[in-house]
Amino acid sequence: MMDQITLTRATDADAQDVLKITKRAFDLYAREIRKRESVAALYETLSDVLSDIHNKNVFVAKIDGETVGSVRFELLSDGIAYLSRFSIDPEAQNLGIGGLLLEKVRIECLSMGVRAITLHTASKMRSTVAFYLKNGYYIHSISKDSDYIRALMVNEICEMDEMFDYETVCARAKH
């Protein structure tokens, strides 16, 4: 039984848990797209996670003190944020934790003056795409710049020009 869900900014003490959750979640992602070698999150090190904690916005979700999810985002140019390494422990999926983390990111972005939140996900993962659609994102475009087809998803916090060049802004993100 869940007693308490907390969403907090990650600290160095969370890095090992963030790494573990990321690898567990992205292992499923890699199996689904059948391109394990293309999923950079699987090759991340503790040092990479610590670097993100120091240089990006990293949040963790915990149930009764146990880390069950994490998300990272960075601010790009033109008021755009890029979300990456969104990970929910497979055993904690479908509990609403993912939606809570996305809402936490949205609230943080609002306070920072962000105009839109962007991310990439494998376009063939229907359940993942549906999750983002349900949480206010839309498919802006599809790219083949990786070994698999990815959808660029956008959640506009304020009204944006439909033709805004998200692709170029997001290309500068290190993901």
Image: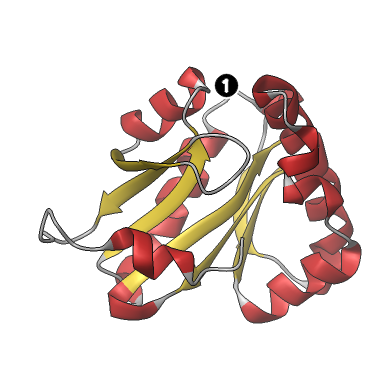
Instruction: Answer whether residue 64 is visible to the viewer in this image.
Output: no
Q: Is 61 on the left or on the right of 45, as rendered? A: left
Which one is in front, 89 or 120?
120
State the SS at label 1: loop
Which one is in front, 29 or 88?
29
Which one is in front, 36 or 77?
36
Residue at 79% in and 65% down: 49
Circle 1 Cα neighbour tier, 10 Å, few/some/many (<14 / 14–19 / ≥20):
few
Tell me which corner region of the image, top left, top right, bottom left or bottom right, holds residue 161: bottom left
Q: Position of residue 113 (x, y in %)?
A: 28, 76
Q: Position of residue 57 (x, y in %)?
A: 57, 70
Residue at 78% in and 34% down: 36
Q: Is 55 on the left or on the right of 28, as rendered? A: left
How many numbered marks, from 0 up? 1
Instruction: Answer whether residue 100 is visible to the viewer in this image.
Output: yes
Q: Position of residue 106 (x, y in %)?
A: 37, 57
Residue at 85% in and 51% down: 43
Residue at 65% in and 80% down: 55
Q: Is 64 on the left or on the right of 84, as rendered? A: right
Colour scheme of the rendered structure:
secondary structure
Q: Is residue 74 above or below residue 146?
A: below
Q: Is residue 83 above or below residue 142?
A: below
The three-letter amino acid code for the residue at tag 1 is: Asn
Q: Is 173 on the left or on the right of 129, as rendered? A: right
Q: Position of residue 135 (x, y in %)?
A: 35, 36
Residue ID for mark 1: 94
Tell me which corner region of the image, top left, top right, bottom left or bottom right, holds residue 48: bottom right
Image quarter of the N terminus: top right
Image quarter of the C terminus: bottom right
Q: Is residue 22 above or below residue 46?
A: above
